[in-house]
Image (cartoon, rainbow, N blue to C red):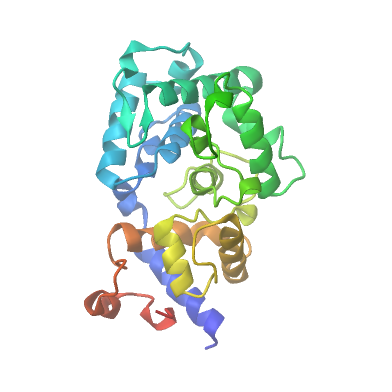
């Protein structure tokens, strides 16, 4: 068995191991609570936007936010007019109530203008790559925010939620959102969008997946970046051209569940399902 075939076999086994029963370890569990597709889309965007920091912190933030938005988050966003007292005191790491207020305002204007987040995205992505689509999406989304000019720096304020490949960013949260809403049929991702093919998705490269991708030889880049995400995706596309990012959820479990800790552990390595294809 050659190296690519062995890697594919090990990753397929990993996907089989970490199935829908592990959703409660991921922010993706939140949109799954809603039967309505419009609610799922809005909650998926918010859950991916705040998917940074510790898992308990992310869960607390989303629980509180969604309780305030009520039974139909999409309707709440459509009716949102800013300055809501209900979000007073909101904090998620370096974001506060004003950042959330502005983010909800952007989502409201998207749905007013285009009918849904998907249609807004599609307006700038027809016939283009995911990279070009994200560049357009971010630029047009920030144009909907009257206060965008007040932010200083690429990751300041609401700009943090709308990263762009044009800046070299890995766009982890936006790529995560796209994975959630494009892929489907496995009980994990939502399969809401049709404007992008699963084959064209780019790997959401967070710190866990970036580290494991290096161990597997999927990328030579030492830090998460758009170039690293594209390189790792290209390597996975050779294993499954139609659905390269299907491996993401399982790979991320290795980091989140500390099955692949940051510091090498002989015990963890012995128990690892992909140890014989790891270069660490």
Query: Dividing the picture into quarters, in which one does residue 57 lie?
Result: top left
Query: Residue lying furthest bottom in this view?
Result: 1
Indicate the quadrant containing the C terminus: top left, top right, bottom left or bottom right.
Answer: bottom left
Rendering coords of residue 92 (x, y %): 33, 34
Picture coordinates of residue 156 (x, y %)? 48, 35
From this view, report whether residue 177 is shown above or below residue 35.
below
Residue 195, visible in the rendered structure: no
Q: Is residue 95 left or right of residue 127?
A: left
- Residue found 41% across the figure and 12% down from its top: 83
| Horizontal and vertical percent position of residue 243 | 58, 59
Where is residue 203? Give x, y as percent. 54, 56
Q: Is residue 70 left or right of residue 229?
A: left
- Name which quarter of the figure residue 32 lies in: top left
Q: Is residue 269 left or right of residue 72?
A: left
Q: Is residue 25 above or below residue 216?
A: above
- In the image, what residue occupies the spot 48% across and 44% down? 173
Out of 129 and 38, give the one closest to the viewer.
129
Q: Work out whether 270 lies above or below 30.
A: below
Total residue callouts: 0
| Among the 4 quarters of the image, the one containing residue 150 | top right
Q: Residue at x 53, y 49 (%)?
A: 183
Give the residue furthest to the front: 152
Quick check: can you spot residue 72? yes
Which residue is drawn at the image coordinates 42% and 66% (left, top)?
Answer: 211
> Nearest the camera: 192 or 137?
137
């Amino acid at each position: 068995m050659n190296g690519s075939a062995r890697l594919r076999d090990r990753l397929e086994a990993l996907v089989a191991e970490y199935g829908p029963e592990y959703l409660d370890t991921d922010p993706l569990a939140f949109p799954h609570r809603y039967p309505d597709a419009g609610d799922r889309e809005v909650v998926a965007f918010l859950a991916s936007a705040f998917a940074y920091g510790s898992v308990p912190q992310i869960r607390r933030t989303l629980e509180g936010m969604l309780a305030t938005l009520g039974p139909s988050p999409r309707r709440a966003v459509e009716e949102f007019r800013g300055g809501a007292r209900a979000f007073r005191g909101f904090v998620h790491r370096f974001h506060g109530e004003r950042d959330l207020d502005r983010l909800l305002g952007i989502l409201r204007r998207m749905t007013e203008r285009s009918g849904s987040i998907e249609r807004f995205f599609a307006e700038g992505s027809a016939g283009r790559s995911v990279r070009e689509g994200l560049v357009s999406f971010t630029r047009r989304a920030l144009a909907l925010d009257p206060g965008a000019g007040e932010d200083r720096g690429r990751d300041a304020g609401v700009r943090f939620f709308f990263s762009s490949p044009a800046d070299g960013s890995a766009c982890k949260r936006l790529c995560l959102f796209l994975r959630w809403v494009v892929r489907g049929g496995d009980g994990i991702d939502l399969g809401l969008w049709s404007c992008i093919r699963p084959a064209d998705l780019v790997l959401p490269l967070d710190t866990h997946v970036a580290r494991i991708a290096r161990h597997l030889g999927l990328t030579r880049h030492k830090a998460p970046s758009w170039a690293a995400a594209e390189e790792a995706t290209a390597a996975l596309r050779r294993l499954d051209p139609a659905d390269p990012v299907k491996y993401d959820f399982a790979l991320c479990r290795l980091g989140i569940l500390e099955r692949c800790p940051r510091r090498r552990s002989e015990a963890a390595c012995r128990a690892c399902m992909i140890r014989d294809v790891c270069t660490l």
